[in-house]
Image (cartoon, grey):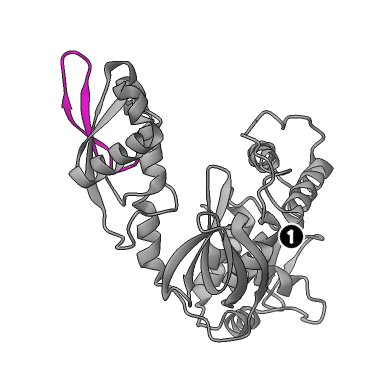
């Protein structure tokens, strides 16, 4: 059976008890007492018996621990030198881990911090101690130039974990000016190679999104932290493409768009969003689709980049927004001539 968090914690404690030379002849009573002390809740003897059986026999976790029971002392012991911390990987596990490492390694380099790169190298080195192979390096991901502000990734990440506000200097590209802000960071979010922090801003008195490339001189503050309702915001992120909502009301809208024949098969096999559904299929290859999303600037840009492949039909305010962007991007006077 697959390893779950609670069982894993119990396995580690049982393993530590059986390897503890100070605890001679640990009985079921000893196991139960220590488990309850360390986990902080009642553990039945039947649960411990099942754990021991799983550690000995369960192929799903693969410990095959040499646990024996002594009738003379009514205690449990390892019949050979053993610890679950040193259980080697089988070949299938090695191959699966190598594939995961390949993906991790492909994201190292310019995209992440030095600590991330060091961690990737450590995992690779550890794995290579068990398997000598060059069977990674098959995955190639898009490499983007280093983003300004990525050096603050760890500081902001730690502030989120430790629930500390941060003070930053923020640069506004449009207004071309700096301002001092106090943020209560809740999420770090990546979109198309760029990182953003979603935080409650004391100065704006609302939740806002800030690109790391516009953040300077951040440091953590020792003051009361204002948390966000994570269940609400997790759902919010599921209902949007990108990071910059056009409105702050967090409301989804039903967006209908027509897809031209040369692009219809692609959009069916690569949906814009999990909410996408087909409303109508025409004999000439056109299809009418609908998604339910929070309108974002990134979604507007998505449709703008596909003007020759699809046409947004509803709702009117969203259609008008796209039309305004098109109008502003061209010199209408030259066209009229």
Point out residue 91 in the picture as x, y percentages from the top left corner: 69, 37
Does 51 sit above or below residue 297?
A: below
The residue shown at (31%, 39%) is 322
Q: Is residue 10 visible to the viewer in this orientation of the structure?
A: no
Residue closest to the far top: 284
- How many numbered discs, if any? 1
Q: Is residue 42 visible to the viewer in this orientation of the structure?
A: yes
**Magenta segment: does it hold 288?**
yes
Determine which quarter of the picture holds residue 314: top left
Residue 37 falls left or right of residue 15: left
Crowd tier of the residue under label 1, counting other residues whose Cα lies within 10 Å: few below 14, some 14–19, many 20 or above:
few
Point out residue 1 in the picture as x, y percentages from the top left corner: 51, 52
Secondary structure of the residue carrying numbered label 1? helix
**Magenta segment: does it hold 51?**
no
Residue closest to the far front: 337
Give the extent of the magenta segment: 272-290
Q: Which residue is mark 1?
A: 85
Point out residue 217 in the picture as x, y percentages from the top left corner: 69, 68
Residue 296 falls left or right of residue 149: left
The residue shown at (66%, 64%) is 216
Determine which quarter of the picture holds residue 14: bottom right
């Amino acid at each position: 059976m697959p390893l779950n968090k609670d069982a894993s914690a119990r396995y580690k404690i049982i393993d530590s008890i059986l390897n503890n030379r100070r605890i001679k002849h640990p009985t079921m009573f000893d196991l139960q007492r220590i488990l309850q002390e360390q986990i902080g809740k009642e553990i039945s003897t039947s649960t411990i018996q099942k754990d021991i059986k799983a550690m000995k026999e369960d192929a799903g976790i693969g410990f095959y621990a040499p646990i024996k029971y002594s009738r003379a002392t009514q205690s449990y012991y390892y019949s050979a030198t053993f610890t679950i911390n040193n259980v080697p990987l089988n070949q299938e596990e090695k191959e699966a881990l190598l594939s995961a490492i390949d993906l991790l390694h492909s994201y190292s380099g310019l995209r992440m911090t030095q600590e991330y790169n060091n961690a990737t190298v450590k995992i690779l080195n550890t794995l290579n101690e068990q398997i000598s192979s060059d069977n990674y390096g098959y995955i190639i991901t898009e490499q983007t130039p280093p983003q300004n502000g990525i050096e603050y990734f760890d500081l902001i990440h730690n502030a989120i974990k430790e629930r500390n506000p941060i003070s930053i200097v923020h640069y506004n590209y449009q207004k071309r000016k700096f301002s001092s802000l106090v943020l209560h960071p809740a999420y770090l979010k990546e979109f198309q190679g760029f990182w953003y922090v979603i935080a409650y801003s004391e100065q704006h008195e609302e939740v806002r999104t800030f690109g790391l490339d516009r953040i300077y001189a951040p440091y953590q503050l020792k003051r009361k932290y204002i948390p966000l309702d994570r269940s609400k915001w997790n759902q919010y992120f599921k209902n949007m493409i990108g990071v910059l909502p056009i409105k702050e009301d967090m409301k989804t809208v039903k967006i209908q768009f027509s897809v031209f024949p040369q692009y219809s098969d692609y959009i069916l096999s690569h949906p814009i969003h999990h909410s996408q559904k087909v409303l109508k299929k025409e004999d000439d290859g056109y299809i009418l689709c609908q998604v339910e999303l929070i309108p974002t600037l990134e979604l507007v840009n998505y449709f703008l980049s596909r003007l020759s492949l699809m046409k947004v039909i509803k709702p009117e305010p969203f259609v008008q927004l796209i039309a305004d962007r098109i109008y502003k991007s061209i010199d209408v006077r030259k066209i009229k001539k």
